[in-house]
Amino acid sequence: MGQLRLGDEAPDFEQKSSVGPIRFHEYLGNSWGVLFSHPADFTPVCTTELGYTAKLADEFAKRNVKVLALSVDAVDSHNKWIDDINDTQGTKVNFPIIADDDRKVAELYDMIHPNASATATVRSVFIVDPAKKVRLIITYPASTGRNFNEILRVIDSLQLTDSHSVATPVNWEDGDDVIIVPSLKDEEVIKQKFPKGYKAVRPYLRITPQPNK
Ligand code: BEZ
């Protein structure tokens, strides 16, 4: 398939994982999903990333998000590595690691960038909503660990957009003021949705307190 873009349906797949075979869409059910790839098992940066992600289990659960990691190594290798992650990071990996040794998922999601590495997946992140639409794609180089607090921040922003017709400004953090989406023009609807009022800095820049706080 062509390159995956925001708004596309996240391709479904069936693949082996550290917790047994997984059908992606069925596994997600009505949850949001974070699918992220890493270059290989037993690599240092990934070990820290997966450990930290495990520690965020409550944060993902609060937001109705299921997490899946992936690399092109096999299930046996994943399981041995999970013991190492648990040991070295002081946690318990509590999400599946997909064993994409035939690169089926890596190809579907364009996770191998041949000019970076012919065999290893780059650090891709896909956020998928409950309708199975791709809502975020980011790609990091192999040598840079991702910021999983940022991934939580984006999920908060996306969920607020869906529930309250707001966008979030630069460096927004949960609890900060937000922006009324420009497409919302009806003053009656705006009054109902934003009873705390708003400040129009410009007609297109309307700031309001975060509605769900
Ligand atoms: C890794 O830990 O995955 C890694 C570290 C340095 C360079 C590339 C990858």
Image (tube, rainbow, N blue to C red):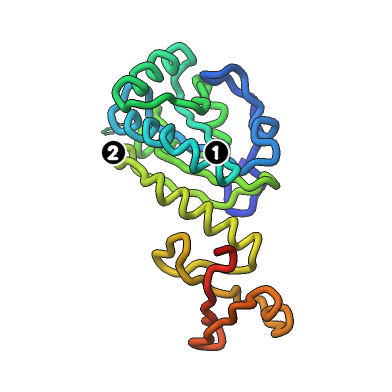
Judging depth in this view, the residue of 62 and 170 nearest the camera is 62
- Image x and y of residue 133, in percent: 65, 48
Say left or right for 33 vs 125.
right
Q: Is the residue under label 1 in contact with that under label 2 (CB below 8 Å)?
A: no
Could you say which disc has been placed on residue 143 in the image? Answer: 2
Disc 2 residue crowd, few under 14, some 14–19, many 20+, Cα 10 Å = few
Q: Does the residue labelled 2 lie within 8 Å of ligand 1?
A: yes
- Image x and y of residue 187, in percent: 70, 85
Say left or right for 211 vs 111.
right
At mark 2, the secondary structure is loop
Circle nearer the N terminus (2, 1) = 1
Say above or below: 150 vs 190.
above
Amino acid type at mark 2? Ser
- Image x and y of residue 104, in percent: 57, 27
Say above or below: 204 vs 45.
below
Amino acid type at mark 1? Tyr
Q: In which quarter of the image is the C terminus?
A: bottom right
The residue singled out by tag 1 in the image is 109
- Image x and y of residue 196, in percent: 59, 78
Q: Quadrant of the N terminus?
A: top right
